Image (cartoon, rainbow, N blue to C red):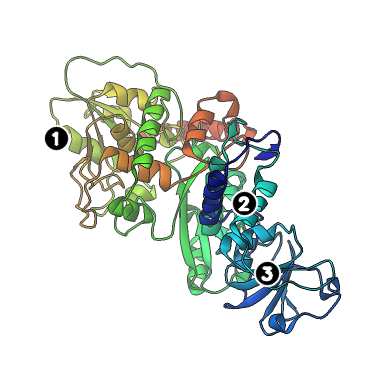
Amino acid sequence: MSRSGAADAYRDEQVDEIIRELAAAKVGGAYWGAQPALPDEGYTVVRLTSAGDLDRPLPASLTDTPLVWADQSHAAWEGEDLDLESGELDPWHLLSRASQLVCHAGDEVMLVAGLLGVPVSFVLASGAISEPRPLTRGELRTAVRDQLLTSRQYHDPFSDQPISVAAAILLCSSWRELINSNRDLAAAFGFAAWKRPTTEALLWSGFRPVAFDRPLRELPAKAAVAVWMSRVSPQVLTALGRRQVQLIEVEDGFIRSAGLGANCVPPLSIVVDRLGVHFDSRQESELEQLLQHGGFDEALLKRAEAVRCELIARGLSKYGVGAVLVERRGSRRHILVPGQVEDDRAVLANPGGALSNLRLLKEVRAAAPDAYIIYKPHPDVEAGHRTGAIPDAVTRTLADEIMRDQSITSVIAMVDEVHVNSSLAGFEALLRGKPVTTYGVPFYAGWGLTTDRGPPTERRTARLTLPELVAGTLLVYPRYLDPVTGVPCPIEVIIQRLSQPETRIGQGWLVSLRRIQGRLMKIIKSRRMARC
């Protein structure tokens, strides 16, 4: 992200602002490195390979405190190696509770100590050690200039365009937050092989690879484990329950890919929830907490509105891109009813009981007897991979039209209202300013933005604006992966990549095979229905 090049001259007050931003974000050095157990407090970090680097014994002022000997990839305390597992050592963690640092002048970790206010003792040319003292403001400025500014130019990794130091710090800060949130993950279960290349980077703890399908006998009791719940066998869930692990649910994000998950198109976005999956309103989720308590600042809300407008302009939805104008079918009120996968957890989790696609259609027709109702089957059902198909003859007794080939965004743009069970299409309709009626309890219901016919959720007392819903649901809650660089990114990068065919994921041999398989299954199911 940084490279050699001409740098502007920075005034002292500008360097001071960079110092404040670095200290707040705790980035610089191998901030993604391991965080081994250390003494509680009051220890001295010695950044020397061994005591042989000194020409004389350590002074008594140092030997009176616990000593942690550390270099970039190794640490020892009281003669015992600390377990770094692999990789590098996070210097911010190393110095977080230290009483002082002993190092050579120019050591890059000296800057971290200065930012944390940890006193530093230098190894002098004579081999002696100086008295510990905090770095002065002038020394901090010099260290920042030398290590981060002089002959340095920062570039956005996604666009390769020059960016400010502040923008680089902000991006690194987002990566640190993501890595820190993954540090306690001991294993991951239920992740298909074709999902792992994109999900691994979003679950990476910084210093060790994700332990997919780790042998259960190696799993520590009460560990944190990421699970793709619908793909974990009951036997594994039972075994995990015996070990009293904390299950952290992972699911597809809301802007996922240019292609179906059922066709093995890997996700470019996931959501990770430690409380409960977001589509099950029977329990609280992190998304629900986020929306309930809000507190989004003005800058985030403006960004959310810009993202919403960009999604509409580019015709982006969960599985695809592009919107083609669809003509209206007359002057009657047009209602879109999107179907769902009937054995999907989002449908089965409905507090009022699972609502089939046929029953949903019946309820919508009863509520709007004079409307022009358009039924759009779920793409995974249409692809032949999942359950929820309704025979066309039956559908046409309740709906005026079945739309299959048009994108969901095109149909939403044409209709007056969208009526859903718990489909994400309802959220996508809200993004486009359409009235939405819910018959289940999706994550976007109960906040004052929808007409709700499903069971009430008493926990959801906040009244949200649309920018607040978008900020929580699309900007803060999910995790996104750039398919070009392979690193986590903000949603704006995903919007750009999905709008460019050459950077989309989803054209491999496995995807093609799954599409063929889906067509065959669809033919088999249709013939079974015809015999009934």
Q: Where does label 3 land, which residue?
A: 101
Q: Observer-nearest residue: 242 or 146?
A: 146
Image vertical order of residue 68 relative to residue 28, above or below: below
Residue at 71% from the left image edge and 62% from the top image edge: 86
Quadrant showing the C terminus? top left
Q: Amino acid at mark 3?
A: Leu
Q: Position of residue 297 (x, y in %)?
A: 34, 45
Q: Where does label 2 land, which residue?
A: 141
Q: Observer-nearest residue: 446 or 332?
A: 446
Quadrant showing the N terminus? top right
Image vertical order of residue 411 relative to residue 96, above or below: above
Q: Amino acid at mark 1?
A: Ala
Q: Quadrant of residue 71?
A: bottom right
Q: Quadrant of residue 310?
A: top left
Residue at 52% from the left image edge and 34% from the top image edge: 493
Tell me, for residue 367, which label it has, or none: 1
Query: Of label 2 and label 3, which has the lower sequence position?
Result: 3
Q: Amino acid at mark 2?
A: Arg
Q: Quadrant of residue 374?
A: top left
Please rate how many residues cluster around mark 3, counting C-alpha atoms within 10 Å: few if below 14, some from 14 to 19, many from 20. Answer: many
Q: Observer-nearest residue: 21 or 264?
A: 21
Mark 3 lies on a secondary structure that is: strand
Q: Position of residue 150 (x, y in %)?
A: 69, 42
